[in-house]
């Protein structure tokens, strides 16, 4: 019988397979192009396995903090930073609770790697269907980001370039190695633009272990996100379309 992988192990294996070195380099360079000043106080609100925080740190952005909605991930990240000698604080907080968990304000809030649309689904929570029911959830997070940002600061949100109504989903596979074990990852997404819901399944298998995670995300377009950021109070919002990343970057100026 194979060992059952935890959800955090599934995501770490799948995420490391998805985020190869070239992807990480391209994405972090796109963020660095936007941020420019390496002294900026930055909060990465989608800590996960440490992308893109580790990569920004290596580029010289050392005034960094991280949050993750999963307490286990936040603790594991703090240990990783400590083991690497990085003075980076990792907090456990949902995006809606940022103001209650962190009293500081930041020059930049980063929400990279198509994380924003998983605001409810990442932790397995209820995900209402239809855009009119999803908009209040989007606004709750955007206003939380807005309040945690200094005046004239930036909020940078990565949204997948495939988040367009013509896209219906895909099946992708990755092979990777972790601690000497060879893994095969199956990454499947099904887009329902009528319901505005993406159902995402990730399955990881090896000769010794296996695990699966099923999550839902909301479906919005970059144009809709721009409009909602304006509603949330950002005085200027623009879109950066990097050539070599899977995301567009939606940038709001407070």
Image: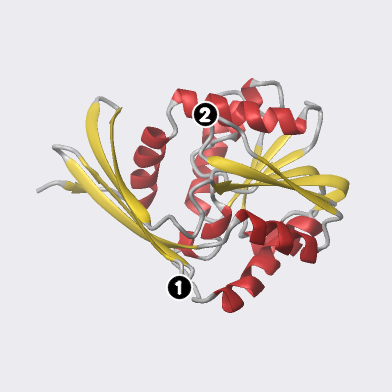
The percent position of residue 228, horizontal first and vertical second, equals 71, 64
- As measured in the structure, the alpha-carbon distance from the residue carrying label 1 to the one carrying label 2 is 33 Å
Please state which of the two labelled residues, at mark 1 or mark 2, is closer to the viewer. 1
Q: Quadrant of residue 106?
A: top right
Q: In the rendered image of this protein, does residue 190 appear above or below residue 89?
A: below
Instruction: Describe the element under mark 2 as helix, strand or loop.
Output: helix
Mark 1 surroundings: few (<14), some (14-19) or many (≥20) residues within 10 A: few
Q: Residue furthest top?
A: 59
Q: Residue at x 23, y 37 (%)?
A: 184
Q: Earlier in the sequence, mark 1 or mark 2?
A: 2
Residue closest to the far front: 166
Note whether residue 87 is visible: yes
Q: Is residue 82 visible?
A: no
Residue on which the image places disc 1? 194
Looking at the image, residue 250 sits to the left or right of residue 73; the answer is: right
Vertical arrangement, residue 85 with respect to residue 91, above or below: above
Q: Nearer the viewer, residue 131 or 59?
A: 131
Residue identified by numbered label 2: 24
Please rate how many residues cluster around mark 2, counting C-alpha atoms within 10 Å: few if below 14, some from 14 to 19, many from 20: some
Judged left or right of residue 229, residue 23 is left
- Is 193 situated above or below 66? below
């Amino acid at each position: 019988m194979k060992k059952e992988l935890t959800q955090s192990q599934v995501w770490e294996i799948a995420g490391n397979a998805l985020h190869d070195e070239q992807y990480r380099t391209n994405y972090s360079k796109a963020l660095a192009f936007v941020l420019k000043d390496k002294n900026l106080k930055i909060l990465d609100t989608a800590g996960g396995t440490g992308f893109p925080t580790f990569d920004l740190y290596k580029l010289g952005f050392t005034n960094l903090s991280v949050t993750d909605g999963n307490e286990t991930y936040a603790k594991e990240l703090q240990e990783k930073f400590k083991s690497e000698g990085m003075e980076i604080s990792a907090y456990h907080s949902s995006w809606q609770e940022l103001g209650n968990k962190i009293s500081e304000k930041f020059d930049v809030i980063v929400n990279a790697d198509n994380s924003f649309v998983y605001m409810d689904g990442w932790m397995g929570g209820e995900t209402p269907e239809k855009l009119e029911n999803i908009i209040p959830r989007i606004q709750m997070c955007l206003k939380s980001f807005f309040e945690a940002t200094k005046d004239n600061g930036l909020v940078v949100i990565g949204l997948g370039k495939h988040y367009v109504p013509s896209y219906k989903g895909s099946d992708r596979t990755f092979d990777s190695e972790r601690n000497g074990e060879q893994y095969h990852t199956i990454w499947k997404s099904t887009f329902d633009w009528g319901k505005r819901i993406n159902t995402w399944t990730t399955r990881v298998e090896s000769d010794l272990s296996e695990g699966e995670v099923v999550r839902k995300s909301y479906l919005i377009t970059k144009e809709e996100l721009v409009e909602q950021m304006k509603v949330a109070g950002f005085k200027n919002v623009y879109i950066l379309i990097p050539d070599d990343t899977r995301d567009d970057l939606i940038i709001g100026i407070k």
